[in-house]
Image (cartoon, rainbow, N blue to C red):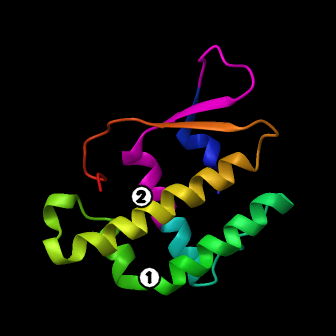
Amino acid sequence: MDVLQYAVPEERGDHSRVYYAVDPDQMYPAMIDYIQDVVEGEVDALEGVNAHGARDVRFYLGQARRLGPKAWTLARRPVHQVKRGERELRGQALEIARLWYTALLRSLSRKPLGLHILKGSGAYRL
């Protein structure tokens, strides 16, 4: 997955870190598609990932599998379209997607990463 297509570099005056801004309305649907493809075996999750990132990716893949397909279906829906009893499962899926995305982005740099998720439409709020 080309994570940089969803990340815009941000200048924050701190040269010890690399900062990116991400639009949740673009990143989350792409990550959910990617995760589902990886879980289904259509995509190699470790392609292009360094050794440190590979450990993280394996961990998030295990979590994604444990959540099951329903979680990823719920994660695609705006929060107001999800029943209260299903919001926790949806939130877990979105959190895995965010963490996995961050791990992929982090694997591209030797510097620590700062990720700024923009406001977006609000559809992917937890």
Q: Secondary structure at mark 2?
A: helix
Query: Which of the 4 image quarters holds residue 52?
Result: bottom right
The reply to whether residue 25 is visible in this rendering is yes
Q: Is residue 55 above or below residue 40?
A: above
From the viewer's perspective, is 91 left or right of 10?
left
Span colored in magenta: 10-32
Residue beneath the point at 72% across and 38% down: 112
Q: How far across and how far down the image is residue 54, in percent?
A: 77, 66
Residue 49's disc number: none
Which amino acid, mark 2? Pro
Mark 1 sits on what residue?
Answer: 67
Q: Position of residue 93 (x, y in %)?
A: 41, 69
Query: Which residue is rendered at x = 46% and y = 65% of the image?
Result: 32
Secondary element under disc 1, as helix, strand or loop, is helix
Hey, which residue is sitting farthest right in the picture?
Answer: 51
Q: Amino acid at mark 1?
A: Leu
Q: Is residue 28 magenta?
A: yes
Question: Marks 2 and 1, Cα distance to the nearest angstrom?
Answer: 17 Å
On screen, residue 64 versus residue 81, left or right, reads right
